[in-house]
Amino acid sequence: MKTILSNFNKAFESRVRLGIMSVLAVNESMDFTGLKDILAATDGNLASHLRALEEAGFISMEKSFINRKPNTSYRITEEGMESFRSHIKALEELIGNR
């Protein structure tokens, strides 16, 4: 049990962060508005979680303009995908150990 718990990543303990990583793991990219809508998060809450995941190297951000409007999109990094998969595997092992 202790070994399984050691594979949990504290960066993914928040509902919003777990949601961000889940969405980005199955989509090539997602813009801020799309993440906000899917996760039902406020601008400030989502922005702070995105910043933390970006600073950890788990996601990357790209700013662009679409029809002269600013657009910020996010992608999961290789490191982020590897860490997230490890976290999910640990959760599955914990559930399977019941």
Image: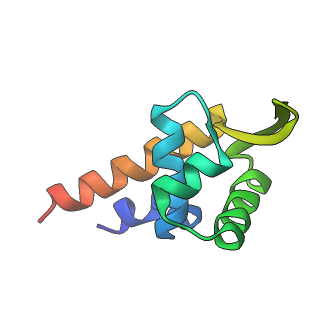
Q: Position of residue 51 (x, y in %)?
A: 76, 59
Q: Is residue 52 above or below residue 58?
A: below
Q: How many marks?
A: 0
Q: Is residue 13 left or right of residue 30?
A: left
Which quarter of the figure is the N terminus placed in?
A: bottom left
Foreground residue among 41 and 20: 41
Q: Quadrant of residue 52?
A: bottom right
Q: In percent of the image, x 48 and y 44: which residue is there? A: 23
Q: Is residue 94 above or below residue 22?
A: below
Q: Position of residue 5 (x, y in %)?
A: 39, 66
Q: In percent of the image, x 19 and y 60: which residue is there? A: 95
Query: Which residue is most to the left?
Result: 98
Q: In percent of the image, x 52 and y 65: which residue is there? A: 16
Q: Is residue 29 above or below residue 20?
A: above
User: Colour scheme used in the picture?
Assistant: rainbow
Q: Position of residue 73 (x, y in %)?
A: 71, 39
Q: In percent of the image, x 54 and y 40: which residue is there? A: 24
Foreground residue among 62 and 34: 34
Q: Position of residue 53 (x, y in %)?
A: 69, 56
Which quarter of the figure is the C terminus placed in?
A: bottom left
Foreground residue among 19 and 33: 33
